Image (cartoon, helix red, strand yellow):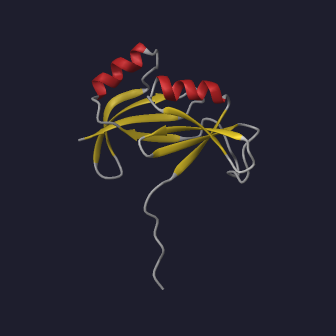
Amino acid sequence: MEQPKLHTLDHLVLTVRDIDTTIAFYADVLGMTHLPFQVADGSTRHALRFGPHKINLHQAGAEFVPKADTPTPGSADLCFLTETSLAVWAAHFESTQTHIVEGPVARTGATGPIHSLYVRDPDGNLIEVSTRT
């Protein structure tokens, strides 16, 4: 029997302390688009879209079921690829008063070498913005 294989990521979920604060950060600082969406029960949920990818947001303490065993704000470490130079990102982070934790530094991404800047979102999740080298 052939081993089944995955080919891509559809979405991931971030558990957050404040949905509106999170939306503002990811839209204003990282350029993502807020995407409210309705589910089968008619309720509205919130997501962030960038390219073909989506991050669903769960309010801490009111997560949608099923959920992670221990949904915790601030436990994620995410790396996003960009084609914009890190110098432009550094200036943007400064203009939005977003503290750069580290970088630019050389790292290894999923497909090879990258250069990265690190910041934190409002929940303390580590956000890596990277260019391929």
Q: In front here: 105 or 97?
A: 97
Q: Which picture quadrant has residue 61?
A: top right
The x, y position of residue 4, in whole percent, is 48, 74
Q: Work out whether 113 lies above or below 16.
A: below
Against 8, residue 37 (above or below) is above
Residue at 46% of width from left, 45% of height from top? Answer: 53
In this orientation, which residue lies closer to the viewer: 49 or 65?
49
Q: Name the residue furthest bottom.
A: 1
Q: Residue 80 vs residue 126: left or right?
A: left
The residue closer to the viewer here, 34 or 84, is: 34
Residue 9, given in percent of the width and then of the height, sits at 48, 54
At horizontal 29% and vertical 36% (from top left) the residue drawn is: 83
Tell me the quarter of the picture where residue 18 sits. Answer: top right
Give the percent coordinates (x, y) of residue 114.
29, 41
Q: Quadrant of the C terminus?
A: top left
Viewer-proximal residue among 5 and 130:
5
> In the rendering, at what x and y percent does residue 45 appear?
66, 39
In percent of the image, x 45 and y 16: which residue is there? 96
Instruction: Give the number of marks.
Output: 0
Identify the residue shown where x is 50% and y is 41%: 77
Residue, far left: 133
Q: Seen in the image, is 44 located left or right of residue 5?
A: right
Instruction: Tell me: residue 8, above or below residue 92.
Output: below
